[in-house]
Amino acid sequence: GAVVSQHPSRVICKSGTSVKIECRSLDFQATTMFWYRQFPKQSLMLMATSNEGSKATYEQGVEKDKFLINHASLTLSTLTVTSAHPEDSSFYICSAKQGRSGNTIYFGEGSWLTVV
Amino acid sequence: SQQGEEDPQALSIQEGENATMNCSYKTSINNLQWYRQNSGRGLVHLILIRSNEREKHSGRLRVTLDTSKKSSSLLITASRAADTASYFCATDFSGGYNKLIFGAGTRLAVHP
């Protein structure tokens, strides 16, 4: 089956620094990728929709200047958490939609971010 | 913002019992999906039910969908300790171009 890979799986960074998380579709082209954030014991909250070659569409309440999303190729989207603070510590999960018209969505394994 | 609500928030049962989780949503959907998540891990896709379907089975899983009530249920029969996890419904809503909105989830604990 299709695989979506996230890297890193765990990262610890200092407060005030930026950290980048990668989401790759390994064996298919993903015109659309989605980024979610999940706090402990809570559900997944959609942050933004990333389309290849265009600007991401952010959900209400998500700061686009803080969570930079780049989808430069059909197999890679990146989420950069800028000037990270402890409250940004969370589990970040991406998903990728296969093809333009299909509704099959594949999820990555997630990335744990801890800001100290 | 999240579209779905799930109940119960937590469910504790004994092995062999059935577990039923419910999900409600607010807008028209293309399909509804159920996912499982073990603590601190990624999501495992369980089953997808389309808006024109009413019931679907997969192994010990049975999903129903009532679009008039905007609700769905997931039944796990003959539960096992390995079924212990969080279960989420996710709606692919009409006009949302395939972005999935997740419900609050149900934390299921199955005791041996």
Image (cartoon, coloured by chain):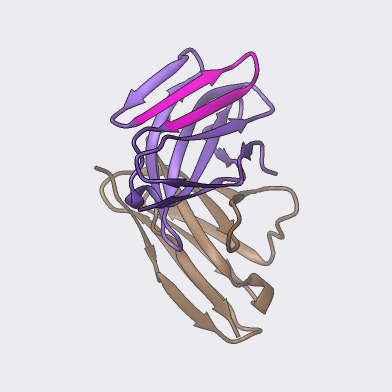
Chain colours: A brown, B purple
Picture quarter with the C terminus of chain A? bottom right
User: Which quadrant is home to the N terminus of chain A?
Assistant: top left
State yes or no: residue B64 in magenta: yes
Query: Main SS of the magenta segment?
Result: strand
Instruction: Tell me which residue sits at (64%, 85%) in the image.
Output: A15
Q: Residue furthest right?
A: A61
Q: Nearer the viewer, residue B70 or B73?
A: B73
In the image, residue B80 above or below residue A83 = above
Report the span colored magenta.
B61-75
Q: Report which quarter residue A29 is drawn in.
A: top left
Q: How many marks?
A: 0
Q: Quadrant of residue A23?
A: bottom left
Q: Is residue A52 magenta?
A: no
**Which residue is painted at 35% across and 51% down in the image?**
B81
Task: Using the image as rendered, state which of residue B61 and residue A11 is in the foreground.
Answer: B61
Residue beneath the point at 67% across and 42% down = B2
Percent position of residue A76, x then y: 40, 56
Residue A104 in view in this figure: no
Q: Position of residue B7 (x, y in %)?
A: 62, 38
Q: Position of residue A30 (x, y in %)?
A: 39, 44
Q: Is residue B26 left or right of residue B32?
A: right
Q: Is residue A76 left or right of residue B86?
A: left
The reply, left or right, for residue A7 in relation to residue B11 is left
**Residue A40 seen anywhere in this rendered image of the structure:** yes
- x then y, percent, for residue B29: 58, 23
